[in-house]
Amino acid sequence: MPLVHHRTATVDGHEIFYREAGPADAPTIVLLHGYPTSSSMFRQLIPLLADDHHVIAPDHLGFGYSAAPSASEFDYTFDALADITDGLLELLGVDRYALYVQDYGAPIGWRLALAHPERITAIVTQNGNGYEDGFVESFWTDVWAYGDAPGPETEPAVRAALGLDAIRWQYLHGVSDPGTVDPDTWHHDHALVSREGNDAVQLALFRDYRNNRPLYPRLHGFLRTTGVPVLAVWGRNDEIFGPDGARAFARDARDVEVHLVDGGHFLLESHLDVVAGHLRRFLERVPA
């Protein structure tokens, strides 16, 4: 099995942790995680890709093993997280790559693609939203309310997302056999989110999430004009980003595959082999 290296790099004065595997001269794929996890969500996928791909999976600033400056020391926005990721890839000399995005990784990845369209060889979105169609209203109503009017009336509903029960729900909802999901996942995430001051980091990103929506028309234009191949492999039972969000990519991408899998938001935990199979076949046929 390919070795996975665990490294850190200093980007704009911040220590960024990343996992790296595979031959340095092979086509690169960059894996971008979501909330509330880290690159650990890709721990089992990375070795399955690394025989013939150079794989890089960073922890976003404020997540996982990357530095987590307080919200008073760093302005946590998706623009800022994308800039840090861009800086890491520049530092590593990565100037051409496929993107794999999930949840928060999607708006970070979209910014990279819009900033450097010539660098993107393919996009894989696994429950990584890029369309209004994908928002499940029952989940997002409280997030929009908090973003529009942060304060004591709107904060408690989103602060609840930091709790262990809410994080467990993210992993287990929509999974037909919850016993297949390792409980270490939600306990690990909860421990890191619960670090002193990290609640303010996460609340800042909840407030900023609404600023991702105006990017969507630009993303759709990018898909139409570049013709970049897209694989949407999606947990069809996700109650955060519903399956219409996956189907919507077919409106703009000229070379697109959409696969709806009988799982939830964190599909790699319950359907690793299914996702890896779709991903490997897709990467074999797209230009590097």
Image (spheres, helix red, strand yellow):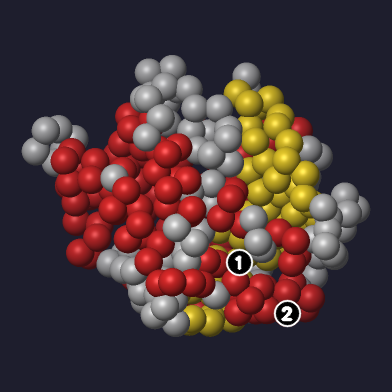
Image coordinates of residue 168 in percent, x first then y, are 35, 57
Left or right of residue 16: residue 187:
left
The residue under the point 16% across, 41% down is: 156
- Mark 1 element type: strand
Residue type at the position of mark 2: Arg
- Mark 2 element type: helix
Residue 281: mark: 2
Q: Nearer the viewer, residue 207 or 249?
A: 207
Mark 2 burial class by Cα count in 10 Å: few <14, some 14-19, many 20+:
few
Say above or below: 199 vs 111: above
Left or right of residue 54: residue 216:
left
Say above or below: 137 vs 286: above
Image coordinates of residue 172 in percent, x first then y, are 37, 66
Mark 1 burial class by Cα count in 10 Å: few <14, some 14-19, many 20+:
many
Residue 280: mark: none
The first of marks 2 and 1 along the sequence is: 1
Q: Nearer the viewer, residue 273 or 127?
A: 273
Image coordinates of residue 145 in percent, x first then y, are 17, 47
The residue under the point 36% across, 74% down is: 174
Left or right of residue 106: residue 136:
left
Q: Which residue is mark 1?
A: 124
The residue under the point 40% across, 30% down is: 195
Residue type at the position of mark 1: Val
